[in-house]
Image (cartoon, helix red, strand yellow):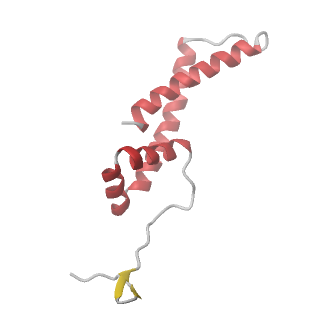
Amino acid sequence: MSSNLNYTKTGDYFLPNLTLNQPRKQLNRYGRMRRNYLMEQRPVVYSTMLLNGTLYPHLWEVEQTAENRMQQLMKELLERNPAPDKEKNQMAWVQHMNSLKAQAEEMILTELIYS
């Protein structure tokens, strides 16, 4: 079994020069939340995925899925619960939209992030 690892001598030991393949783009909100959940609640899964190189692709997938799901849920919730007229009652419209967003976000956190 041969490997193409380079080593650095540190004292009396040779340590491998390991690098992680991490994307240059930063994770957005849902990707960071999922990463924190895995680090704190599922450290074995987090470490395994990190060492296998599957962590960041997983986080990107969760992030994209969460964003798409958020748009879909907002559309569905708005169809079921129409918002008041924005021009006549702006504060009621903002309150209604914030309520719908909180409902959709709670579903996303339960389904995708903390599962």
- Comparing 84 with 16, the one in front is 16
Q: Position of residue 20 (x, y in %)?
A: 43, 67
Q: 8 above or below 114?
A: below
Q: Can residue 86 be spotted in the picture?
A: no
Give the quarter of the figure containing the N terminus.
bottom left
From the viewer's perspective, is 103 left or right of 91?
Answer: left
Identity of the residue furthest to the front in this view: 11
For the point 41% across and 50% down, which residue is it?
A: 39
Number of numbered discs visible in the structure rendering? 0
Q: Position of residue 36 (x, y in %)?
A: 46, 46
For the point 57% across and 11% down, which residue is it?
A: 81
Identity of the residue furthest to the left in this view: 1
Q: 35 above or below 100?
A: below
Q: Position of residue 98 (x, y in %)?
A: 63, 22
Q: Position of residue 59 (x, y in %)?
A: 45, 49
- Comparing 11 with 113, the one in front is 11
For the point 33% across and 83% down, which residue is it?
A: 4
Q: 92 above or below 16?
A: above
- Comparing 17 with 65, the one in front is 17
For the point 35% across and 57% down, which residue is it?
A: 47
Give the quarter of the figure containing the C terminus.
top left
Q: Can residue 39 be spotted in the picture?
A: yes
